[in-house]
Image (cartoon, rainbow, N blue to C red):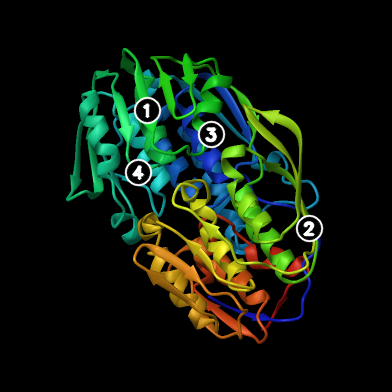
Amino acid sequence: MRARIEPGGTVRGDVHVPGDKSIAHRWLILAATASGSSRIVGLPTSLDVRSTAACLALLVPGARPSLEAWLVDARSGDQHHGFTWDTDTGGDDRSALEVEAEGRGGLRAPGSDLDCGNSGTTMRLLAGVVAGAPFRTVLRGDASLTRRPMERVAEPLRRMGAVAETDDGRPPLVIQGGALRGIRCEMPVPSAQVKSCVLLAGLAASGETIVEEAARTRDHTERALLALGAPIAIGERDVEVSAFQHQGFEGKIPGDVSSAAFLAAAAVLTGGSLTIRGVGLNPTRLGFLGVMARMGIRTEQEVLEERLGEPVGDLSVGPGAGLTGTGVGEGELPLVIDEVPVLAALAAHADGETRFAGAQELREKESDRLRGLAEQIQGLGGLARVEGEDLVVAGGGLAGGNADALGDHRMAMAMTVAALGARGPSEVGGMESAVVSYPGFVEVLAGLGARFGG
């Protein structure tokens, strides 16, 4: 699927975005391992979330009927590009999932390998769950996921007492679970997925499990566990948890702020203004707003409520007087790692150079985003390069041209947004990749005023 982007449109209005998939993965797992009934509203139908639901259906027999029914309903939206959200209300109860579970003791050996699709979150978090279960689990993924590093979770799980095997550090990931013991896990590479894996395993371990981070990462797992009453202590750089069985819960998934970032950038680059309603405003996810502020972009946020420990409200962005290049240091990068593609799209139109320093972790995403961003910005008529492990975007605007998503959902959306501000028309190939996190992305942009050719 190729998208032809025409200059001249203006993105403006009010909009809701699909539910936050980072939160959705975690709440789904917590619902399937709860004791009792849970109800989750607003689950996004993105492919990554479907992967988690499908894997849980094989692990939790009692929840299988409801999970499979939700999956059938989610897939039925594919004829409409999977976009089932009402842009006026932010979704409704048709996206609700009710799960009846029997706690971690209700987990059963899956009858087949668990297919995690493209989702590294699915693989890493579920590894922590099955590590405490007395059976063998094989977690596989697609070609992209098979290239991603999994020794990061295998090593601490081994120290906790599980058998964890990888293929030279990559998937498939094979876990033989059993009795676990708490450990202190020092993480040299910041990763919320690895942290969450160890914390979820720690819920089934004897003694205390402590995760110490080199840099703070998103804290959705900690917030949910705290709201559910888990014995968890959260410090500035470390998290400690002890064995705990949580009860069922109810919650509505906040809108995905990472998805909101792409729409906000589209408004900025087309001279429009936009308000995204009901979006998650977790501080550990808002680092990109600080980078945008340094570039000269004005944003406002208003927290209106809290859902299972997550602050939720509205995010607004208005037209700026011009973009200025900036620097993103190695210490800041972990807090904006998922937003680097959209920040690079903005940087391509800035006055002056923007440098993303120490960005080697971009090589380990759904594609090699470090190299890919430089090459695709060049394809759209801009100037960008890789210097060592730094991504450098020269700025000055884009002439228009051709780019490819490289099978990566964030690359698909970032290059589309970048092209909206180009001087001439552009084409972006592989747009079907966007369904991984934002089904219907192009249709939503068009509805807000962006111009796309036939």
The mark found on residue 274 in the picture is 2
Q: Quadrant of the C terminus?
A: bottom right
Residue 21's place in the image compared with 202, above or below, is below
Check if mark 1's residue and mark 2's residue have beta carbons within 8 Å. Answer: no
Quarter-of-image position of residue 146: bottom left
Given the image, on which type of amino acid does mark 3 rest? His
Q: Amino acid at mark 2?
A: Leu
Q: Earlier in the sequence, mark 3 or mark 1?
A: 1
Task: State whether residue 392 is above or below residue 426.
Answer: above
**Residue beneath label 4, please?**
189
Q: CA–CA distance between discs 2 and 3?
A: 26 Å
Please say if the residues under marks 1 and 4 sit with CB atoms less than 8 Å apart. Answer: no
**Residue beneath disc 1:** 211
Query: Do the residues bearing badges 3 and 1 touch, measured as CB atoms within 8 Å?
Result: no
Q: Nearer the viewer, residue 416 or 39?
A: 416
Q: Residue at x 34, y 15 (%)?
A: 208
One can see residue 69 in this view = no
Q: CA distance from mark 1 to mark 2?
A: 38 Å
Are the residues flagged by discs 2 and 3 in contact, CB closer than 8 Å? no
Q: Residue at x 51, y 38 (%)?
A: 218
Helix, strand or loop at mark 1: strand
- Counting from the top left corner in percent of width and height, residue 161 is at 21, 24
Label 2 neighbour load within 10 Å: few <14, some 14-19, many 20+: many
Quarter of the rendering containing residue 227: top right
- Helix, strand or loop status at disc 4: loop
Total number of numbered discs in the rendering: 4
Mark 4 surroundings within 10 Å by alpha-carbon count, few (fewer than 14), some (14 through 19), many (20 or more): few
